[in-house]
Image (cartoon, rainbow, N blue to C red):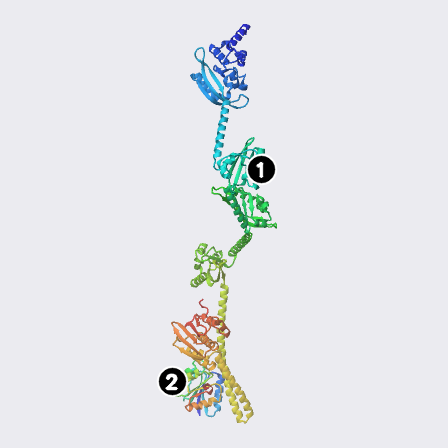
Amino acid sequence: MSLTDQAFRQNLTAKIFHGEGELARRCREKDWSQTPLGPVESWSMSLRTTAGLVVASPTPMILLWGPQLVQIYNDGYRVVMGNKHPVGLGQPNRDCWPEVWEFTAPIYNGVIARGESFNFDDQRLVLERNGRPEEAFFTLAYSPVLDDDGDIGGVLATVLETTALVERARVEEALRESEQRIARALKIEMVGVLFFDMRSTFLEANDTFLRMTGLRRGALQRGELNSALVTLPEWMPRTWQAFEELKANGRFAPYEKELVRPDGSRWWGLFAGAQLSENECVEFVIDITAHKRAEQARYESETRFHAIADLVPDMLWQADPGGQRVWCNHRWTEYTGQSSQEASGYGWVETIHPSERNAVLHKYRRAMETGVRFRNEHRMRRADGGYGWFLVEAVPICNDAGDILHWFGSANDINDQRMTMDRLEELVAERTQSLAESEERFRLLVTTSAQIIWSTDAAGRAAEDSPSWRAFTGQDAECWLAGGWWSAVHPDDIASTERTWQIAVGSGQPFVAEYRLWHARSGNWRWVAARGIPLCDGVGRTLGWFGTNTDIDERKRAEEEVRRMAYSLTMAEQEERRRVSQILHDDLQQLLYALQLKLRMVINRLALEKQSALAEMIEEARVIIKQAITTTRQLTVDLSPPILKTEGLADALEWLQRQMLELHGLEVELVSRPVMPGIDEDLRVMLFQVVRELLFNVKKHAGVERATVVLEQADRDLIIRVEDDGLGMGRSADVAFQGTGFGLSSIRERLRQVGGSMGIDSSVGAGMRVTIRVPCNPIGIGNVKE
Amino acid sequence: MVRVFVVEDHPLMRDMLTEFLALEEIFEVVGVVDSAEAALERFPDPLPDLVLIDMSLPGMSGIDLLRKLHERQPGLPCAMLSGHGEKHYVEQAFEAGASGYILKGEPDELPQAIQQILAGKPFISPELQR
């Protein structure tokens, strides 16, 4: 630039920005060519005119020119700029005020694009004109400025900062509100409001305070009232303490005290206050008399409760809503050795067994958090250091709104119960183990035993498989479990066995039976002895049956053999007796009689020869022989009555009838009805012996001298009844006759051998009637029916 | 002389009876057999005065023989000589037609019994009458 041009520019600038203000000076000194507006000589006339007017105006203004809204402002606007001045001069508006661009951009657009004007009163803006965000209020007016060609070249804004005015208005509003609040406070009926000076003299008070205290407004207005007039002497120290606190901190913490009215009635107040000015304080009072009385009542109630609670044998305690223990009864201290103080808060946790402590605490805290009832069994330490089991419970006590006021807890001593339960559990475990072992042994027994082992339910139905039964009988498990056991039993034994089993199941008495069971391996029936016992619970209820079948076939056969041998022996003995009897009769008696004849002849001869001495000696011998003959004859009869050999049974019984009367003094009435002739001699002999034995029994045991023997036939059976009216006998007496050598059991067995039977009808004192029944053609030995 | 016919199976008894009766002067043993069958087959002719029959004979019994003889010679005296002391046999014998029942015990009863029977009085050994 030449000096001429430079002088021109300075001259032009001075014309545009004349005046003594700072901004006028800066505008003159500003090298506008470095701004988007370019050198002043290039400015339009409209710009030159408007910029000069703005800078010269005392009203805070700013001109924003050109597309970039380059700023030209005056001294009035300088304050608004803050520390953005002087950089903001000649700077695009957006670069200078980015923090309010969001607010201003639509305005500028409205002005430039559409020629609109905008006005704002006390517009709040947050500016950063002093290095930090700052709330400021402005009255704004935006209007378009035309360029030389009539188009809008820029925006003229008058900016009047009203921040101070707004702030003052705010303060004034706050003050009004405060006054209104105070006025309202004074009108509050529930709260007493008192203004007093630093000497505690009452200055002003609302009606509520006067009503609470019973004071009169006149005395108040005369400045005659102070704290000492309404406070009980014992509460004055607390009152002075609050007053000192007020002087030190400008306020005092709320406190309660008891006051007295002029009429002597007492009331409780809750006080809070603050210093308003150097010599003025305000105090708010709430009448809490009702609350205090309720609290007192509650305290008395709690005292009574605690007194009662101390008598309770259980441990009781109380905790605040957060679970902190606030009280426990004496029993707690007695048991744990922990004082109430030590147990307070969470001190009680120390008494819990270490191994359970964390779990209990976790559960307890969770209950406190959720408000759900706490219940737990754990061990607690006794004063002596040992531990006992307790059932500990805690329940929340709530107000009407459902808020937890406190927790109430108890600890019940369940040590004995727990010990018992533990012992029971141990016993159950032991028994379970024992049972398991027993069952294992049982299964082992079932699978390996030579015996048949079975079990049923209480109703007698097969409860589980019996491998040993299956192995013996060849039945399958399905058949056994379906109750088909009887199909393996001998047809002749099914009815009696089933009946015996049903009786046992019905009565709960042991099941005992012998029957023939099909033996699959040998293809034969084999005798088994079945034994079953009921398995009962502790109260005698039948749970099931357990039984065994023992193969007694060999024993049975041996017994049968013994019976056969016994019968053979009996028969042999009988035969031998007959044989001896016959020898005695046919030989010995003949010989003796022959000897008698011979000796008679000898004696006669000696008599002829007059050898009387010798004859006498032989005569003596002959007497002896005669005695021998008599003895032999009787012996012959005793051994085997000859009549049995030669006569029928009826005749033999008649002979026996006479024998019993003559030899034993028993009068026997014989009723003999026609019977089939030709009864086998062996049977005849046996029946004769049976009847004779029964008559001997009557003679020995019945206590009577009479008996009746009836012989008759029914169909093909021979029936003999031996009756008496004697002492009779009970069932056990059967055994007593065993000693006679031919007891009832022996008789029964011998009858059984020939397919017969014997029935006894007798009771003590009612005589006895024995009925013998045998087939006329008895089954031969070796064909005995079982 | 009383003629006696003896039926006795036991050899020694036969001999003794024969000898014993022979020693009595009034008796004559006209025959001795060892069984009932033999007696019927070889019954003496002329008839004896008395038949002495042992009750226990092999084969046909003495009672049966009695019955048969009683059928053949209803009036012929027969005495049963027996070792059986039961009255039952006595009754059987008399029912069969016996005139006497002599127990084999006392020898002196034998001649006494024969004479009593021949005198028309039935005889039963005193021992059986007690």
Crowding near the residue tagged with mark 2, few <14, some 14–19, many ≥20 C-alpha atoms within 10 Å: few
* Residue A570 picture location, percent across and down: 49, 73
Up/down of A485 relative to B122, above or below? above
Up/down of A259 relative to B97, above or below? above
* Residue A140 picture location, percent across and down: 47, 19
Up/down of A568 relative to A586, above or below? above
Q: Are marks 2 and 1 in contact (CB under 8 Å)?
A: no
Up/down of B76 relative to A236, above or below? below
Task: Identify the residue shown where x is 50% and y is 13%.
Answer: A56
Residue, disc 2? B71
Looking at the rendered structure, the kind of residue marked 1 is Trp
* Residue B81 picture location, percent across and down: 45, 85
Check the picture and name the quadrant holding the C terminus of chain A: bottom left
Using the image as rendered, state which of residue A85 and residue B90 is in the foreground.
A85
Front tag of 2 and 1: 1
Looking at the rendered structure, the kind of residue marked 2 is Glu
Crowding near the residue tagged with mark 1, few <14, some 14–19, many ≥20 C-alpha atoms within 10 Å: some
Chain where mark 1 sits: A
SS of the residue under disc 2: helix
Residue, disc 1? A240
